Amino acid sequence: MTTESRSIDQPALLAGAPTLQARNSAAFWTATGVSRGHEVIRRRGFVAVDGDERAGLRILVQQPDLDPGEVAELGELVGRAAGPLIVEDPFSSTDLSHLGLRTWQMPVMLRPPGPVDAPALEVTRVRRPEDLREAERVVIEGFELDGFVPHRPGELFPASLIEHPGVDVFIASIDGAVAGAGVSVLADGVASHYWIATSSAFRSRGVGRAVMLGALAHVADLPATLTASKLGRPLYESLGYTVAAPSTWWAST
């Protein structure tokens, strides 16, 4: 793998990574909410997708300086959430400790534009309904999304999701079986990646790397962001990502 990239102002990109991730996350979850028929609430300081008792409530903080009215409205949304809730704050600047939520941090990471190696496994962009269902199954298993069990096809990834401009689902296959999946979102000239998952039957076989390489190949000339788990961070660093800032997440207990 090579991490060589064109001449860019990487410090400026790193400094702006929380904002880039915030905008991309809002684009992804807005597309997801619209596809599911859920209410999307847009404010200056946050975007909220208000779902049902299985999908729950997702709030994406969009500014580092929410005003008191926005914080109060955010608290009202949390208080009446129908199901599980997650608040994602890539700026780590909004204190929600008064809401009794559990909290943790994960790094926002950024990859500058640059060439990408070919994946070692077969990676395809999803176009067929049956492939989308397989991707959905892998993500539910890989992320242990108990709220989507039992599996209802099309609930996590509605068929119309991949019809949204800039939203793509990729799958990696081994011997004809879907081994991994992930979502790539391109919005406002920035790419980001979500739900990078590997089926338990294919762990430790380079599936996550293959999914990422296959997805990055389509956006190699653009900056890319993501929010990394502890387990995922070493993979992303090996692909040229650098930690930019901590993102604070809040969730129902």
Image (tube, grey):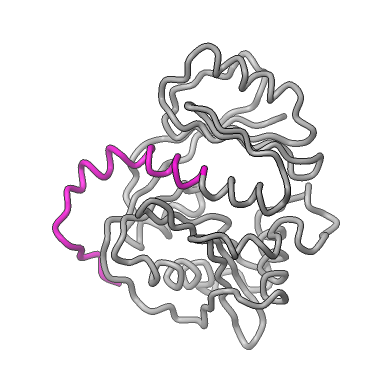
Q: Residue furthest bottom?
A: 175
- Residue at figure coordinates x 45%, y 81% from the top left: 120
* Total marks in image: 0
Q: Nearer the viewer, residue 121 or 10?
A: 10
Quadrant for the N terminus, please.
bottom left
Left or right of residue 148, residue 188 in this image: left
Residue 21 in the image, given as x and y percentages of width and height: 42, 44
Q: Magenta part mainly helix, strand or loop?
A: helix
As displayed, is residue 220 above or below residue 174? above
Q: Residue at 14% across / 58% down in the picture?
A: 7
Q: Residue furthest right?
A: 150
Q: Residue 122: percent from the left, percent from the top?
A: 52, 83
Q: Looking at the image, which residue is at 69% across and 25% down? A: 78
Query: Is residue 54 or residue 2 the one in the foreground?
Result: 54
In the depicted structure, whether residue 178 falls above or below residue 88: below
Residue 216 appears in which quarter of the rendering? Answer: bottom left
Q: Which corner quadrant of the image does residue 160 belong to? A: bottom right
Stretch of the chain drawn in magenta = 1-26
- Left or right of 230? Residue 132 is right
Task: Give above or below for 106 relative to 124.
Answer: above
Instruction: Indicate whether 103 appears above or below 141.
Output: above
